[in-house]
């Protein structure tokens, strides 16, 4: 890794077509798990002008009206345009119930040997943490998420009444000696409703006042006189959402994770039940990396887990610290393997994944936007710093 560089990360609002698909997919997953925590479910979604397509494969006792669930998500996000809205959009569904011999429920987790619950997918997945922010996330994606969430909140409030649901943010951070140094640039792309398109000057003034300034008021590194701030740099963005560009579940994996500051799996995180190791394994890897950094063993830590079909444990656990570690990386990896159980059944049990949707049927939909990791608005079990003492004691 170079010592001095500029790094950019992007985030999207909840109305971006790809994120809309992620939310629909996870809302369907949440409804199935709410009624039957042992459900096996994969839900994929695609959207285009006036159209939502759902592909659902499930096993279990739950009955879910997927079309109604999709319409409710579209309504909550706020699409009202004639070309795409919850009342008139066509929803096509392909629902297939399949037989599945494996049942992953509370009784199984309590009684079964964790080695008997094996990975059913090949997966190489990554978790990352660093000291850039209090939540141990890379600063570029942390700021991009905060801007996107604020942009969406402002749209839904009375502060700015002409914004559409579709939006995107990008933050470029300048690093010196591998540490965040200054804000190099900020880009906000915000769609406006057809009935009212403000002047470029008004849009810029409104978004600077109501979005950029409040977000950076709480940050130690803020825009300076040399920071480039671009608001809709290509001009008015009037026709946004699925009528402008199609969306697909799982296309924003970098947005879901670390903004490409660290590696991430190519597998989608949304639209899958907790028995899918490519989803919960990514959470477990983040949990391990975050505790390593919180323990002071490294300033940057990436944990790589590789699973093979038919085997419960990862066949490989690797650690990368880019020279920031206080111990040899092999020693950190050994401590991680002693302190964290990466078998699928153990992850599901440790994070109480089967209890999340029954408590809150909207949990997975909330998780689908603004990152699956590094969240402060959700009490995510994989974000807890609860293994620091174990990691420190593992070397004694």
Image: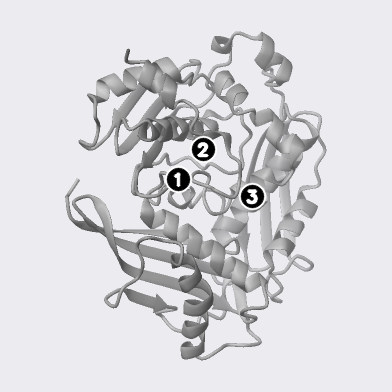
Q: Nearer the viewer, residue 293 or 45?
A: 293
Residue 351, percent across and down?
59, 28
Q: Position of residue 260 (x, y in %)?
A: 36, 49
Q: Are marks 3 and 2 in contact (CB under 8 Å)?
A: no
Residue on which the image places disc 1: 135
User: Which image quarter: residue 30?
Assistant: top right
Task: Estimate how packed mark 2 is, as few (under 14), some (14 to 19) or many (20 or more) residues with alpha carbons within 10 Å.
Answer: many
Helix, strand or loop under label 1: loop
Q: Is residue 243 above or below residue 389?
A: below
- Note whether residue 315 is visible: no
Q: Which of the image's four quarters has the N terminus?
A: top left
Image quadrant where one finds the C terminus: top left
Q: What numbered label is drawn on residue 383?
A: 2
Residue at left offset 62%, top offset 82%: 162
> Which one is nearer the viewer's eye here, 321 or 100?
321
Where's residue 150, x and y in %? 55, 66
Which residue is drawn at the image coordinates 44% and 60% (left, top)?
144
Mark 1 and mark 2 residues within 8 Å of each other at the beta carbon = yes
Give the spatial CA distance, label 1 vs label 2: 8 Å
Query: In the figure, is residue 286 to the left or right of 355?
Result: left
Q: Name the residue that disc number 3 marks.
A: 366
Residue drawn at point x = 55 percent, y = 57 percent: 18
Whole-angstrom CA distance, mark 3 to mark 1, is 18 Å
CA neighbours of label 1 inside 10 A, class few (<14), some (14 to 19), many (20+): many
The first of marks 3 and 1 along the sequence is: 1
């Amino acid at each position: 890794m170079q010592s001095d560089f500029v790094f950019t990360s992007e985030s999207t609002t909840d109305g971006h077509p790809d994120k809309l698909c992620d939310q629909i997919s996870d809302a369907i997953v949440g409804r199935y798990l709410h009624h039957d925590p042992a459900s096996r479910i994969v839900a994929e979604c695609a959207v285009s002008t006036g159209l939502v397509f759902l592909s659902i494969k499930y096993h279990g006792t739950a009955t879910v009206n997927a079309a109604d669930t999709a319409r409710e998500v579209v309504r909550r996000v706020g699409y009202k345009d004639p070309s795409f809205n919850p009342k008139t959009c066509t929803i096509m569904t392909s629902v297939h119930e399949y037989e599945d011999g494996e049942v992953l429920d509370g009784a199984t987790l309590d009684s079964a040997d964790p080695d008997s619950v094996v990975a059913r997918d090949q997966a190489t997945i990554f978790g990352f943490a660093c000291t850039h922010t209090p939540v141990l996330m890379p600063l570029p994606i942390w700021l991009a998420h905060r801007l996107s969430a604020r942009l969406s909140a402002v749209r839904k409030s009375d502060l700015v009444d002409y914004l559409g649901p579709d939006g995107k943010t990008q933050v470029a951070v300048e690093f010196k000696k591998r540490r965040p140094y200054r804000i190099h640039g900020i880009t906000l792309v915000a769609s406006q409703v057809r009935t009212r398109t403000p002047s470029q000057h008004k849009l810029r003034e409104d978004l600077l006042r109501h979005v950029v300034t409040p977000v950076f008021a709480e940050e130690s590194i803020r825009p300076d006189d040399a920071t480039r701030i671009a608001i809709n740099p290509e001009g008015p963005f009037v026709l946004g959402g699925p009528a402008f560009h199609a969306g697909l579940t799982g296309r924003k994996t970098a947005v879901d994770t670390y903004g490409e500051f660290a590696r991430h799996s190519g597998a989608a995180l949304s639209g899958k039940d907790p028995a899918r190791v490519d989803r919960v394994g990514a959470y477990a890897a983040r949990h391990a990396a975050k505790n390593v950094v919180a323990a002071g063993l490294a300033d940057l830590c990436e944990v790589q887990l590789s699973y093979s079909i038919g085997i419960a444990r990862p066949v490989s656990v690797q650690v990368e610290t880019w020279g920031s570690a206080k111990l040899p990386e092999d020693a950190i990896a050994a401590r991680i393997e002693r302190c964290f159980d990466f078998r699928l059944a153990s992850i599901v049990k440790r994070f109480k994944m089967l209890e999340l949707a029954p408590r809150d049927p909207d949990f997975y939909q909330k998780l689908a936007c603004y990152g699956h990791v590094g969240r402060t608005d959700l009490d995510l079990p994989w974000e807890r710093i609860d293994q620091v003492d174990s990691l420190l004691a593992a070397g004694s």
